[in-house]
Each structure stands twice: as C-alpha cells, then as structure tokens.
C-alpha cells in the first residue's frame, strides 16, 4: 500500500528501471508546455472548470497539474516508488476543493482522465523520438495511467474525508439546535407549574439554525419514538449522516442515541407526506405530538412522550387526534378520583357486566341522541339489546345522564379507562 492509500501498480519497481535514463530528461522538457495544454483542454471540455482560473481555485488547478506531471517524471527517473508524501497534500487539496465548491467528484475525475490522455499523446511522441521498443512504450502507458489513478485516489480519499467531517459537524450543530428547541425553558409560560429560566434569545436561536443549515419553520411537531425498533425494522440512519443517504427527510432533526429518542419535524403537513418519515414513525412506534408554533416544540414533545407512555407499546399514535386524552393524562390522580366517584354505580357488577355497560355508557354519551338505534349501530348489537342496556344505565345513574357536568365527568372517566 503506497502513501496515497492505494495498492502499487503491477509494473512499478523493477520494470520502471528498464526505461532509458534519457527518457526522464526528455519528458521533463515536454512538461514545460504540457501543463498549459492540459489546463486549456480541461477548461474547454469540462464545464465545471470553464471559469477563469483566478484566486485559490486557479492556483489549486495549476499547482495540481504541474505537480502531477513533475512527480510522474521523477518516478520514471527513480524507477518507480510510492507517491511523494510532500506532494500528496496537493492532490488532497483538489479533492477538498471540489467539496467546498459544492460539486461531486465527477468533474475532477473527468479532468484527471482528460489530463492523462493529453499527456499521453505528448509522451508517446517522445517515446518514438527515442525509438523506444514496443514493450517499453506499453510499459510507459501502463505506468502513466497508474500514476493518474493513484493521484486521483488521493483526491477521492480527501473528498470523502472532508465530506464525513462536514457531515459530522453538521450533525453536531443540528443536535445542538434540537436541544435548544426542545429545552423546556424555550417558551416562557407564566402558568407553568414550575418556574422556567429565561427563554433562548431569538438571535441565539437564529444563529444556531444558520449554523445547522436549517430554515426556521413556522410550525413543528415532535415525535416520541420507542427506544427499540420493531423486529425486522431497518435502522433509521447513521446519526452523523444528516443529509447523505438518510431514510428520513434531511430537515427532520433527530436524537436517536439518547434514552428518550425523538424527532422534530418542521412544516409537518409537508414532511409527513414523505413515506420515509411515515415508515420510521411506524417502525419505531412513534407518538406524534400536536402541530405547534416553533417556540412550543418542547410542549409538542412533552405531549408526545405522555401519549407514547400510555399508548400500546407497538402502535404509533397521533396526539392531534387525541387531544382530549392528553388532557386527561395531564393529571391521572384527579381523573382516577373523578372515575371512582362517577363510576361507583358500576362497582357492584361483575367484571364482564361492568365492561359491557361502560362501553355502552360511553357510546350513549358520545352519540348525538344516545338512542337505542344509535347505540345498536355503533356497538354492532341488536336494538333490543341496546334498549335493555340503556334501561340498566338509567337505573344505575339516573339524573346523572341528563346533567351536563355529570355527563362531562362520566365521559372523561370512561375515556381515561377505555382509551
């Protein structure tokens, strides 16, 4: 393995020593004008490099071409060997430069291939002038293109490393932003049960969002995830790879490594249309909090976690469809006290009778008129059975069934027990 991180070419070493000593001197003369020709062809044929070669961009291209040509001749003269460690930073800078320009490696690799072809046309003329044997010309071609492959590999490795570093940095910045957004003190609430610290200043939040490349949305929804995926579910994504090959939309913020994993979804109506997000919520039995203004992200997550704690372990849940249940979950002891008082008439029944009449009472309270035909349709029972149950409820609860306050408390108690 050579210094570029690639395996040495099959013709390096002893085979290089077979070249005549004068070959290197002639190639070096050719290089005096070759670099300019290569750069001209690259600018002419590759659109990404067609702009004027000024500033750091131009210096990097000029230096890269001249260094690659000079090193190739040195290797011919010295009989092969690995890439020069002192020259490797030049090739690596080309790879990092492509990432900083926002391009893929396609243009740079095309430039390497084009430069190799232009150089070879010149070098083969030198070989003919020197009357090199056919085998030597073939060997020169092999070593020339292997040299190009090796310096290209150095650029590719540097690009990948810079990309990974950038992704890791972005991931850390987005994690910090998520922490700010779901902090319980983000939105001051004078009615909160516990005092809150000063909220995160607007300028701090805006700067954190800019650093994370995350446009601040008007609304968000938090998702509380189950700590463990369902059996057979694919992992969500490598947390460092925020925008590269994710199974989630790139703007969804996530904490998957903590004890209480969660997502923060911007512009929920748009993002939840993405099947990748819906699949993750399904696979991780996520509970989705209500859609709220950005500054209430912590509230959406708190409600989502409350719902996640009380919903069936393997089922996803949506708080926007269960706001009343969330209200009941806010103070379970009070709900239990209310249930004990309002549902006391059911205590004398057998468990089976109690369950049957509880469902009937809830249906009666939730249907427009609470009539026997409505109950029969809702509960999928015979109308006569519905009438018998209604008579039973009348005997047990009497005036409570017509009192508005009693009806509200009865329904709340039943929803908390039957949810």
Image (spheres, grey):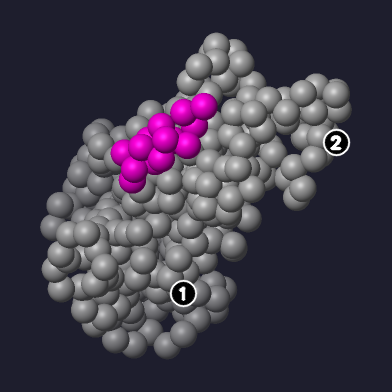
Find residue 38 and report its horizontal and vertical position in percent: 44, 72
Q: Residue at x 31, y 35 (%)?
A: 7
Residue 312 higher or lower than 212, as above or below: above
397 left or right, relative to 263: right
- Asked if residue 133 shows in the view, the reply is no
Quadrant in which the N terminus appears:
top left
Circle 2 crowding by C-alpha within 10 Å: few under 14, some 14–19, many from 20: some
2 vs 102, left or right, is left
Q: Residue at x 48, y 20 (%)?
A: 347
Mark 1 / mark 2, whichever is N-terminal: 1
Q: CA distance from mark 1 to mark 2?
A: 46 Å
Residue range corresponding to the magenta coloring: 331-345
Left or right position of 331 against 135: left
Q: Is 318 located above or below residue 97 in the figure?
A: above
Residue nearer the viewer, 77 or 368: 368
By secondary structure, the bulk of the magenta-drawn segment is best described as helix
Q: Is residue 336 magenta?
A: yes
Residue 412 image position (x, y, % from top left): 50, 44
- Residue designated by label 2: 373
Residue 341 highlighted magenta (yes or no): yes
Q: Which mark is residue 218?
A: 1
Q: Determine crowd level at label 1: few under 14, some 14-19, many 20+ residues with C-alpha closer than 10 A.
A: few
User: Residue 135, image x and y in percent?
Assistant: 45, 38
Mark in the foreground, 1 or 2: 2
Q: Is residue 334 above or below residue 86?
A: above
Residue at image point 50% right, 74% down: 48
């Amino acid at each position: 393995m050579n210094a570029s991180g690639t395996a040495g070419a099959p013709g390096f070493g002893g085979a290089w020593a077979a070249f005549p000593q004068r070959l290197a001197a002639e190639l070096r003369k050719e290089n005096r004008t070759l670099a300019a020709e290569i750069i001209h062809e690259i600018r002419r044929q590759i659109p990404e490099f067609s702009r004027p070669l000024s500033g750091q961009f131009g210096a990097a291209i000029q230096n890269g071409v001249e260094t690659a040509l000079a090193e190739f001749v040195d290797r011919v003269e010295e009989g092969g060997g690995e890439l020069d460690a002192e020259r490797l930073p030049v090739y690596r800078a080309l790879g990092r430069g492509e990432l900083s320009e926002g391009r893929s490696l396609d243009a740079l690799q095309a430039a390497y291939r084009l430069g190799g072809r232009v150089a070879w046309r010149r070098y083969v003329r030198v070989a003919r002038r020197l009357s090199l044997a056919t085998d030597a010309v073939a060997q020169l071609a092999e070593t020339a293109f292997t040299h190009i492959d090796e310096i290209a590999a150095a650029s590719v490795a540097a690009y990948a490393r810079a990309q990974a570093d950038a992704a890791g940095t972005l991931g850390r910045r987005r994690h910090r932003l998520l922490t700010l957004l779901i902090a319980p003190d983000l939105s001051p609430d004078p009615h909160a049960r516990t005092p809150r610290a000063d909220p995160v200043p607007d300028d701090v939040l805006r700067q954190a969002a800019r650093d994370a490349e995350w446009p601040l949305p008007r609304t968000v929804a938090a998702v509380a995830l189950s700590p463990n995926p369902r059996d057979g579910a694919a992992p969500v994504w490598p947390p460092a790879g925020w925008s590269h090959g994710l199974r989630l939309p790139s703007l969804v913020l996530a904490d998957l490594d903590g004890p209480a994993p969660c997502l923060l979804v911007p512009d929920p109506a748009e993002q939840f249309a993405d099947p990748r997000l819906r699949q993750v919520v399904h696979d991780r039995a996520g509970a989705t909090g209500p859609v709220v203004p950005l500054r209430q992200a912590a509230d959406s997550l708190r409600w989502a976690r409350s719902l996640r704690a009380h919903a069936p372990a393997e089922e996803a849940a949506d708080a926007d469809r269960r706001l009343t249940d969330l209200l009941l979950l806010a103070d379970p002891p009070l709900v239990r006290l209310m249930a004990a008082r309002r549902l006391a008439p059911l205590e004398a029944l057998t468990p089976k009778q109690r369950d049957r009449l509880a469902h009937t009472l809830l249906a009666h309270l939730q249907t427009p008129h609470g009539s026997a035909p409505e109950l029969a349709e809702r509960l999928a029972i015979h109308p006569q059975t519905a009438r018998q149950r209604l008579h039973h409820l009348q005997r047990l609860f009497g005036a409570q069934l017509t009192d508005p306050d009693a009806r509200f408390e009865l329904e709340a108690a039943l929803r908390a027990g039957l949810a």
